[in-house]
Amino acid sequence: MAGRFVISITAADVGTRITTRRRDPAGFRDTVGVLESWADGVLKVRKRDGTLVEIPEESLVAARVVPAAPPRPGAS
């Protein structure tokens, strides 16, 4: 059975943790993080390491809400 790409997020998901897959000249790129904003055709996703990734909406091929990240070992 072949998988299919689905975009199941909206601007209403700002503040939730998401995963995205987007087209890139070298192939595909994945980003997981908190959707901080979605305005003027650009999603801004904050990754776990604090990096802010800007993703043009037209490059998205798949996206969905995912559960909160598990705690890191040793974190209190």
Image (cartoon, rainbow, N blue to C red):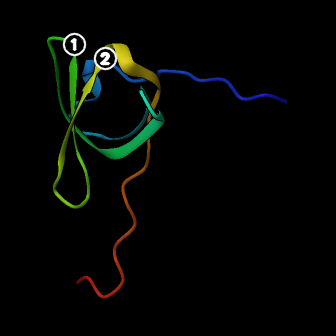
> In the image as oriented, which residue stretches furthest toward the right?
1
- Seen at 55% across and 21% down, the residue is 6
Q: Amino acid at mark 2?
A: Glu
Going by the image, does 68 lie left or right of 41? right
Q: Position of residue 16 (x, y in %)?
A: 28, 40
- Seen at 25% across and 19% down, the residue is 11
Residue receiving disc 1 = 41
Image height check: is 53 above or below 25? below
Going by the image, does 1 lie left or right of 65? right
Q: Quadrant of residue 10?
A: top left
Going by the image, does 7 lie left or right of 18? right
Asked if the residues shown at circle 2 and circle 1 are in contact, with their CB atoms under 8 angstroms apart, the answer is: yes
- Seen at 85% across and 30% down, the residue is 1
Q: Quadrant of residue 20?
A: top left
Q: Quadrant of residue 74?
A: bottom left
Task: Rate crowding at label 2 as few (under 14), some (14 to 19) or many (20 or more) other CA atoms within 10 Å.
Answer: some
Q: Position of residue 43 (x, y in %)?
A: 23, 26
Residue receiving disc 2 = 57
Going by the image, does 27 lie left or right of 35? right
Q: Earlier in the sequence, mark 2 or mark 1?
A: 1
Question: Observer-nearest residue: 26 or 48?
Answer: 26
Q: Under tag 2, what secondary structure?
A: helix
Q: Amino acid at mark 1?
A: Gly
Question: Observer-nearest residue: 75 or 4?
Answer: 4
